[in-house]
Image (cartoon, rainbow, N blue to C red):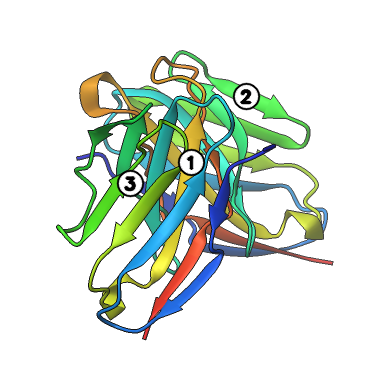
Amino acid sequence: KQEVTQIPAALSVPEGENLVLNCSFTDSAIYNLQWFRQDPGKGLTSLLLIQSSQREQTSGRLNASLDKSSGRSTLYIAASQPGDSATYLCAVRPLGNAGNMLTFGGGTRLMVKP
Amino acid sequence: GAGVSQSPRYKVTKRGQDVALRCDPISGHVSLYWYRQALGQGPEFLTYFNYEAQQDKSGLPNDRFSAERPEGSISTLTIQRTEQRDSAMYRCASSFSAGGPYNEQFFGPGTRLTVL
């Protein structure tokens, strides 16, 4: 059974810092990996989707990397801002006939202080 | 609509009552997914549909939970004889295609269920 772990569970940084969020998964047989942002009272917003054949994806100040063989992904946030405060979730989609469901990690709660 | 919508956004019910949660996916999306998210945890898969067919319901915790999507669009998740442990955020997502590596899921705002 696929298990996804995110470290740290919570993180507080001053504005302007660069930071890295970690995600690990136990089964490397995946289609892709997604990073989501979760804000209170709102749905999950997809930030980046990395296909299993890719090594990284970039969007603005965000960069996500994927090392499928070692079962790891990182989300790098450059020059953090208070508006980045949210919970960040990673999720993997399995290969084969397991269906299209996503397996999520527990999330990292990020607080960026002005 | 522009995105996935869910109703109600908040539901408070008494133990033993039945509840029905509704999901309206993005127009034209083939696949629809239900997840449940406990406080402080990531969402967990419940079930999913391709068109009107329920493809996988392995995540439904017990037979009090059921879901349907009779016309391949709107879906309803029903919980019978609710218990306090059913309290959670119930999230719905939809995707354009039924499979393939580029299948991206778009999530609705969720329904917060509280069972007293």
Q: Are marks 3 and 2 on the same chain?
A: no
The mark tally for this picture is 3
Residue tagged 2: A57
Q: Residue at x 45, y 24 (%)?
A: B30
- The mark closer to the camera, 3 or 2, is 3
Name the subunit of mark 1.
B
Residue tagged 1: B93
In the figure, B60 relative to A57: above or below?
Answer: below
- Is A44 left, or right, of A17 in this rendering? left
Q: Are marks 2 and 1 on the same chain?
A: no
| Mark 1 surroundings within 10 Å by alpha-carbon count, few (fewer than 14), some (14 through 19), many (20 or more) | many
What is the secondary structure assignment of the residue under circle 1?
Answer: strand
Q: CA distance from mark 2 to mark 1?
A: 23 Å
* Residue A102 in the image, given as x and y percentages of width and height: 38, 38
What is the secondary structure assignment of the residue under circle 2?
Answer: strand
Q: Quadrant of the C terminus of chain B?
A: bottom left
